[in-house]
Image (cartoon, rainbow, N blue to C red):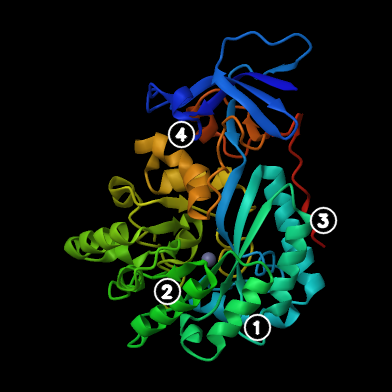
Amino acid sequence: MLLLKRARVPAAVLPPSVALPPPDPIEPSVLCDIEIAGSRITSVGRSGGSAPAGTQTVDLDGALVFPGFVDAHVHLDKTHTWDRAPNRTGTFTDALETLHKDTVNWTRPDILRRAGFALHCAWEHGTRAIRTHVDTWLPFGEVNHAAMQELREAWKGRITLQTVPLTSVAHYGGSQGDQIADLSLKYGASALGGWTLMNADLPAQLDRLIAIARDRGVGIDLHVDENANPSEEVLRATAEAVIRNGFTNPVVCGHCCSLAVQEAERQHSTLALLKEAHVRVISLPLCNLYLQDRRTTGFPRTPRWRGITLIHEMMDLGIKVACASDNVRDAFYGFGDYDAAEVLIQSLRLAHLDSRLPEAVPVVTTTAAEIIGLPEAGRVAAGAAAQLVVFPAKSFSEFLSRPGSRRKLVDGENIRDARPPGFEDLS
Ligand SMILES: [Zn+2]
C-alpha cells in the first residue's frame, strides 16, 4: 500500500464528496491524501488523517497532482514524419499533398517505429488514454490499422489506445462504406470517422454513415470545418443528421473552426443544435494555430486569427468540449511531443480558459475521457486506476508558468521520475 500525503488535486477530477465546497476558482484544487493498493486508488480524502502502521508514505508537500491524461484526438500513423516530409509553406494544402506522397513509406515497421516512439513520449509525459485517427481509403489502410492493433496490445495495461478510421465521408455513401467500417472494426476501432467539406450529397452521406455506425453499434468521430470559411457548416449538418436519424450513439466533431467566423445568430442556432443532438466537440488549438490563416500568396505573413472554435460558448451550454494534441511532428503540425500538460497550458492561454480554470482542467482529463467513452479515466477517485502525474508546482500559477517542468509519475504503488525518450530512439 502507498499513501500519498498532501497531494494538491484539481477539484474537477475529484468526486463531489471531496471537491465540495468549491475552492477559489483562481486555485481550484484540494489538498488530499491518496491511498493506493496494487493498481487502484483505494481512497481519496481531504488531507489530515493519519496513516495505518506499516504504510509506505510519501509526503508530496502540496505538489499539484493530475490523473493520467487523456489525449482524445491524435494521428499516430502520420506522426514523426517531419524529417522526411516537412511542410515548407505551413499551409493546409501542402500538408495534405506532402503527407499523401509520404504514404509510400508507411510500411508496418515504419509505423510501429514512429507511433511506438510517440506512445513512449506520451507515456513518459503521463498520458494514459489516447484516441488516434487512422488513414483509411481502401485498399490503403489495412497496414495502418494492423500496426495500431499491434501497438494496442504492446501498450495494454499502460495506455488505452483507441482507433478511428479517417477517410472521406463520401466513401461511406459508396460501396466502400461497409468495407471501411468492417476493416476498421476488425482491428478494434472504437468509432467510425472521416472528414468532408460541404457538398450537395452531404446529408445523404451522413445518413449513410449513421446507418452503418448504428448497424455496428458504434459512434462516429469526424473532422469538420477545419477552415475559416463561414459557409462551411459540416458541424451543423452533422447535428441535423443526428437529430433527423434519432442517432443516440456518441457523436464527436473535431476542429469546428469555421463556427468562430460565422454571424452570431447562426452561431447560436448551431450551438443549440449541437446541444440538442448531444454532439461532443474536440478542439485542436495547437494545430489550428499552426495551419489556420496561412496563405500561399504573400508568404510569410502575420496570422490574423487563432483558428479555435467557440469553446467558452459551448461550455456555457454544457456541450462537452475537450482539447487534444492532433498532429505531432508532421506536415499538419511541425511540433509537439504528446504532452497533454502542454496541450492544456497552451489551450488555456490561447482560448483564455484561465477565466474558467475549474472547467479548463477537464479538457484533458474528465471530459476528454467521457467524450471517448472512458468515463472512469482522467479521475482521482476510489476505484480509479492509480495513474497520477506529480508536477513540481504548488499552485496553478506555478504549474501554468513553467510548462516544461520535470514531473514524477505514479503507476500503482510505484513513483518515479518521468524520463521522456531522446529523439535518438526514433532513428
Ligand atoms: Zn485530426
**Around disc 4, counting alpha carbons within 10 Å, would you say few (fewer than 14), some (14 to 19), or many (20 or more)?**
many
Looking at the rendered structure, the kind of residue marked 2 is: Arg
| Of callouts 1 and 3, the N-terminal one | 1
**Residue 80 or residue 248, whichever sits in front:** 248
Q: Disc 1, disc 4: CB below 8 Å?
A: no
* Horizontal side of residue 272 vs 91, given as left or right: left
The percent position of residue 295, horizontal first and vertical second, equals 42, 74
Cα–Cα span, label 3 and label 4: 38 Å
Please tell me the numbered disc located at residue 424: 3
Q: Which residue is mark 4?
A: 12
Please tell me the numbered disc located at residue 295: 2
Looking at the rendered structure, the kind of residue marked 4 is: Ala
| Of callouts 1 and 4, the N-terminal one | 4
Q: Using the image, determine if residue 368 lies above or below residue 140.
A: above
| Of callouts 3 and 4, the N-terminal one | 4
Q: Using the image, determine if residue 350 lies above or below residue 297.
A: above
**Residue 128 or residue 421, whichever sits in front:** 128
Cα–Cα span, label 1 and label 4: 43 Å
Q: Which residue is mark 1?
A: 101
Q: Secondary structure at mark 3?
A: helix
**Residue drawn at 29 percent across, 50 percent down:** 313
Q: Secondary structure at mark 2?
A: loop
User: Quadrant location of the C terminus?
Assistant: bottom right
Q: Is residue 335 visible?
A: no
Q: Using the image, determine if residue 403 lies above or below residue 347.
A: above
Cα–Cα span, label 2 and label 3: 34 Å
| Mark 2 or 3: the one toward you | 3
**Around disc 1, counting alpha carbons within 10 Å, would you say few (fewer than 14), some (14 to 19), or many (20 or more)?**
few
Q: Secondary structure at mark 4?
A: helix
| Of callouts 4 and 2, the N-terminal one | 4
The percent position of residue 21, horizontal first and vertical second, equals 38, 21
**Residue drawn at 70 percent across, 74 percent down:** 144
